[in-house]
Amino acid sequence: MVKYIKYIVIVLLLIIITVIAFQFSGKITPEKQIRNRLANFLAKASKSSGDKLSTGLIKSKSLESFFASRCKFQIGVSSFSGTYTPVQISSNSMRSRSMFRHVRFSAHDVEIILNSPEKATVNFTGAVNGVTKRGKSIDDYKELTCKLRLVEGEWLIYSVSIREIIKK
């Protein structure tokens, strides 16, 4: 009888822990969702030394899910500024990845401003660190602003602009 009571107590504890975990997971704030989305995006945009072509294709294709149907880029380089579809962004990502042996994108000093329940502005310092196929090291930093819109439960980027070019 004592043996069954121990099992019942253990099962009840597991159920309580599961219920508590679901309670907390359901309370993710929009800021936390956006922060997680940004981190996930940067991880998928980055390229490790060991990434194969197939890995790059999968990562680049997955970037489509982070953008609205039309995304405006104002990045100071006229040949890259414009409005793009997620498919075009994915294609440009794959082309850019092929120029690097490895490249890491990161965000620092992230500030999230909720403009409304469905719109947000994210200001941050974007860093690009890597080595090109020709062996040139890249360490570049820009002050960026991304505007996001909540669509079907996902925060999608619809605008990217450079606020300030950081001089070394």
Image (cartoon, rainbow, N blue to C red):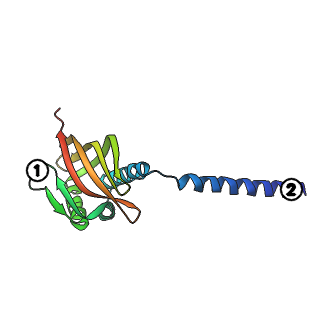
Residue behind mark 1: 77
Quadrant showing the N terminus: bottom right
The residue drawn where x is 21% and y is 65% is: 88
Q: Nearer the viewer, mark 2 or mark 1?
A: 1
Question: Which residue occupies the foreground of this view, 136 or 160?
Answer: 160
Residue 41's disc is none
Kind of residue at disc 2? Lys
Within 10 angstroms of label 1, few (less than 14), some, or many (20 or more) residues? Answer: few
Question: Which residue occupies the foreground of this view, 119 or 13?
Answer: 119
Task: Give residue 24's position: percent from left, percent from top.
Answer: 56, 51
Kind of residue at disc 1? Val
Q: Position of 23 compared to 54: left or right?
A: right
Mark 2 and mark 1: Cα distance apart in space: 71 Å
Residue behind mark 2: 3
The residue drawn where x is 38% and y is 54% is: 37
Task: Give residue 158's position: percent from left, percent from top.
Answer: 26, 58
Which image quadrant for residue 73? bottom left
Q: Are marks 2 and 1 in contact (CB under 8 Å)?
A: no
- For label 2, the SS is helix
- For label 1, the SS is loop
Q: Position of 35 compared to 103: left or right?
A: right
Q: Position of 48 compared to 131: left or right?
A: right
Q: Position of 66 compared to 153: left or right?
A: left
Question: Which residue occupies the foreground of this view, 25 or 106?
Answer: 25
The residue drawn where x is 38% and y is 55% is: 117
Task: Give residue 76's position: percent from left, percent from top.
Answer: 12, 48
Identify the mark nearer the N-term, 2 or 1: 2
